[in-house]
Image (tube, grey):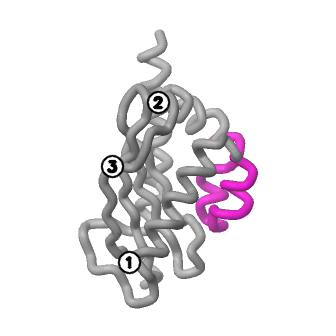
Amino acid sequence: MRKRRMRRIMGMLMAAGMLVGMFTGCAGGQKLSDKFDEAEVREEAKEVIGILNEGDVDTLVDDRWNAMLKSALDKDQVRSQVMPVIEELGAFEGYDKEAVTGSKDPDTEQEYAVAVIKVKYEKRKAQFTISFDEDMKVGGFYIK
């Protein structure tokens, strides 16, 4: 029963991630734009993960999400779909691998920075893909 619930939650997260991915374009290894600083993107991504690990959904959505992501993944959805996944992972242990690339929305030509960070938790690892707009607001969020 628990595995079925996890699969359902992961399916919802993937659907939200794909929706956001359609707007932000693919993170397929494009060079990071000069508009972004790679170290800042890494740190911002880690801060987002830290806020999520603390369970502070209000700060995450109110202060870190951009308007587009707020409409695609609101507070209630984060609480009901993302937080159970984070709780299931167990205690945070540390960061594993990190990469930062660029992305561009083909319709709007807006550039994004995309951080892919693997995180070690007590029970298993997770991979976060977090896209930032030029204001360093989260425009895309995916966890697997």
Q: Is residue 27 above or below residue 124?
A: below
Q: Amino acid at mark 3?
A: Asp
Label 2, label 3: how far apart the Cα atoms are: 15 Å
Q: Residue at x 58, y 35 (%)?
A: 81
Residue bearing the label numbered 2: 89
> Residue most toward the top?
1
Q: Secondary structure at mark 3?
A: strand
The three-letter code of the residue at mark 2 reads Leu
Q: Report the residue at 27% width, 76% height from top.
A: 30
Residue stretch rendered in magenta on the structure:
57-77
Quick one: which residue is furthest to the front in this view? 93
Tell whether label 2 touches label 1 (CB within 8 Å): no
Q: Is residue 5 left or right of residue 57?
A: left
Query: Would you say 125 lies left or right of 12 here?
Result: left
Q: Which residue is mark 3?
A: 96
Using the image as rendered, state which of residue 80 and residue 128 is in the foreground.
128
Mark 1 closeness class: few <14, some 14–19, many ≥20 residues within 10 Å: many
Mark 2, Cα crowd under 10 Å, few <14 / some 14-19 / many 20+, is: some
Query: Residue 104 bears which disc, if any?
Result: 1
Of the image marks 1 and 3, the number of the one nearer the N terminus:
3
**Residue at the spot 38% in from the left edge and 78% down from the top edge:** 104
Label 1 sits on what residue type? Lys
